């Protein structure tokens, strides 16, 4: 199950072209019995994910939960302490339900200031360590520094970036399946 925001909900790109859809096709091609539930919502925050996770876990009973949240918290200037607590609860509830968790780390642009950017990116390592979850340190690795891989808003990756995003996720996900 993917619990994410617009980066996983195919915002601004053709349906079926996002990294989650590419993951579904990869699993099917490889003969995997795993099915993918995309529970991502554009604009989702860590508090929104925390509010929905228990019901999603009960309804879908996933073996793995990929958590791609936090970017909107930063864009809105939300309290990082609250964001970290929300992520910890999401990962903990996932683990307690019997699912393995994979946390996808994010970074913020340098205009947020060095101290905030460091606190934000290190939040993912702290949560992964504290909750014993797998971590992809930077979900947008190989994409963030390439303007041609973004839509005009320079926030959302375009269709050209989706295969790279899948490879980034796969680097942490493969061992969990």
Image (spheres, rainbow, N blue to C red):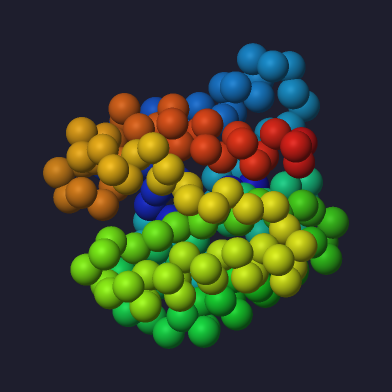
Q: Which residue occupies 32% across, 79% down? A: 77
Residue 59 % position (x, y): 72, 56
Q: Nearer the viewer, residue 7 or 147?
A: 147
In this rendering, the answer to whether 154 lies above or below 150 is: below
In which image quadrant can residue 79 be found? Answer: bottom left
Residue 71, visible in the rendered structure = yes
Q: Residue furthest left?
A: 152
Residue 13 % position (x, y): 29, 36
Residue 103 % position (x, y): 61, 56
Q: Which residue occupies 50% across, 27% down? A: 22
Residue 47, visible in the rendered structure = no
Residue 116 % position (x, y): 37, 77
Would you say 127 lies left or right of 168 here?
right
Q: Nearer the viewer, residue 20 or 149?
A: 149
Q: Which residue occupies 54% across, 71% down? A: 123
Q: How many marks?
A: 0
In this rendering, the answer to whether 19 lies above or below 71 is: above
Question: In the picture, which quadrant includes the C terminus?
Answer: top right
Q: Which residue occupies 46% across, 80% down? A: 80
In which image quadrant can residue 14 be found? Answer: top left
In this rendering, the answer to whether 29 lies above or below 128 is: above
Would you say 36 lies left or right of 131 here?
left
């Amino acid at each position: 199950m993917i619990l994410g925001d617009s980066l996983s909900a195919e915002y601004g790109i053709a349906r079926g072209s996002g990294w989650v859809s590419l993951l579904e096709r990869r699993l099917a091609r490889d003969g995997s019995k795993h099915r993918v539930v995309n529970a991502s919502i554009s604009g989702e925050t860590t508090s929104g994910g925390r509010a929905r996770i228990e019901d999603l876990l009960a309804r879908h009973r996933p073996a793995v939960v990929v958590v791609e949240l936090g970017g909107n918290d930063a864009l809105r200037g939300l309290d990082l302490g609250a964001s970290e607590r929300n992520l910890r609860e999401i990962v903990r509830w996932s683990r307690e339900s019997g699912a393995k968790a994979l946390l996808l780390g994010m970074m913020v642009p340098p205009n947020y200031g060095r101290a905030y950017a460091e606190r934000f990116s290190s939040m993912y390592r702290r949560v992964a360590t504290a909750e014993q979850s797998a971590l992809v340190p930077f979900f947008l690795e190989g994409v963030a520094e390439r303007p041609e891989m973004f839509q005009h808003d320079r926030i959302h990756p375009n269709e050209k970036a989706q295969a790279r995003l899948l490879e980034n996720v796969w680097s942490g996900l493969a061992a969990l399946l």
